[in-house]
Amino acid sequence: MVKKVFVTLEKFKNLKQEIKILKTKERKDIADKLSEYRDSVDLVEDTAYTDLLQEQADLEEKITEIEGLLETASIIKESKAASKVRVGSTVVIRAVGSQKKTKIQIVGSVDADPEKNSISNESPLGTTLLGRKKDDIVELELPTGTIKYKIVDIL
């Protein structure tokens, strides 16, 4: 069974644009450089040629990776206030015993950016929050101990 990867519509469009550039412009640029070197007498000892071959292999690997991601992508629908936390939800939480609230958005791993308070649905906190309701208390096991969060709101 193929695992779905959650992505925002914006990220999906960016990946489609990136794959288009990689398959057209980037492939052509490397192919042109390689054809220049093919006229060289001793390609085996030419490190620039070897580097280009590696660059080509890296490009093809990146194309394959993005194609795989696009094939398994599930676009996150815009979140409306819901009764349960799901991918796409914005959740206000606070550590039990603290008054400081934190607003986080649950996104797919491709869009996760902890600095912008966007966490992956596959992260320990994301996994713990999924399916929970407002006012639920969740426990997160950390190497330093257990931390409890209260779900203050689901936006």
Image (tube, rainbow, N blue to C red):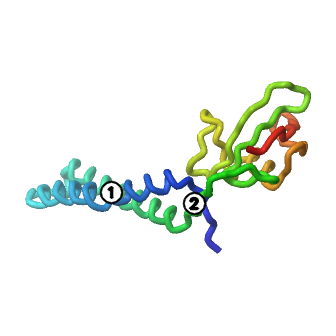
Residue ranking furthest to the top: 99
Which label belongs to residue 75? Answer: 2
Looking at the rendered image, the quarter that the C terminus falls into is top right
Q: Looking at the image, which is closer to me, 35 or 153? A: 153
Q: Is residue 17 left or right of residue 115?
A: left
| Residue 38 drawn above or below residue 155 | below
- Amino acid type shown at disc 2: Ile
Q: CA distance from mark 1 to mark 2?
A: 22 Å
Q: Position of residue 12 (x, y in %)?
A: 49, 56
- The location of residue 42, given as percent across then percent down, is 13, 57
Q: Nearer the viewer, residue 16 or 64?
A: 16
Residue drawn at x 19%, y 52% is: 45
Classify 117 as above or below 25: above
Give the crowd class for mark 1: few <14, some 14-19, many >=20 residues within 10 Å.
some
Q: Residue furthest front?
A: 80
Q: x%, y% of residue 13?
A: 45, 56
Pick the quarter of the image with the N terminus: bottom right
On screen, residue 146 versus residue 124, left or right, reads: right
At 45% from the left and 64% from the top, the residue drawn is: 67
Report the residue marked by disc 1: 22
Helix, strand or loop status at disc 2: strand
Q: Disc 1 residue type?
A: Leu
Residue placed furthest toward the bottom: 1
Relative vertical location of residue 40 with respect to residue 145 in this rendering, above or below: below
